[in-house]
Amino acid sequence: MSDNANPADDVERIVAWQCIGCGRIEGPQPCVGVCQDRKVTLVPADAYDSALARMRQAEARLAALESLARRMALSTPRNGEWEKSFRALQDEARRAMRESRAAHVS
């Protein structure tokens, strides 16, 4: 897997039957004679998809804030221009925080 690959993209989905009464889950497969049962933890696909969407939104917000932090750390304003640069970075930070709050609420 490459450094940019997202492990969430490689998730295998298993189609199974769930009893509407007791909740038992069954995913019949052809047995090849070497089966061993093991305990697994499953979540509904819609819950997983929702968590994945929230994670991707958080990653996008983090990337925007990292970009701002990088510019703050690596920028050197011209002589006499520090206040103008500082104000521009403040405006960008406020915008990023507003967008982050709006994304978090929705």
Image: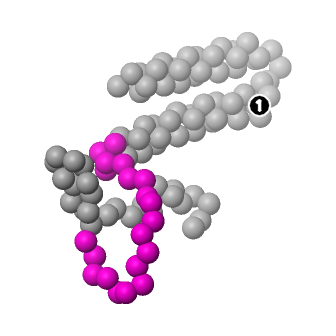
Q: Secondary structure at mark 1?
A: helix
Q: Main secondary structure of the magenta part?
A: loop
- The residues colored magenta run 28-47
Picture quadrant of residue 106 = top left
Lateral position of residue 104 relative to residue 63, left or right:
left
Lateral position of residue 82 relative to residue 97, left or right:
right
- In this picture, is 37 found above or below 68? below
Residue 60 visible in the picture: no
Residue at the image point whose x is 60% and y is 31% from the top = 65
Lateral position of residue 1 relative to residue 52, left or right:
right
Image spot of residue 48 (x, y percent): 37, 46
Residue at the image point whose x is 83% and y is 20% from the top = 79
Pick the residue in front: 82 or 4: 4
Residue at the image point whose x is 24% and y is 49% from the top = 23
Image spot of residue 73 (x, y percent): 77, 31
Residue 66 in the magenta stretch? The answer is: no
- In this picture, is 10 found above or below 95? below
Residue at the image point whose x is 77% and y is 24% from the top = 77
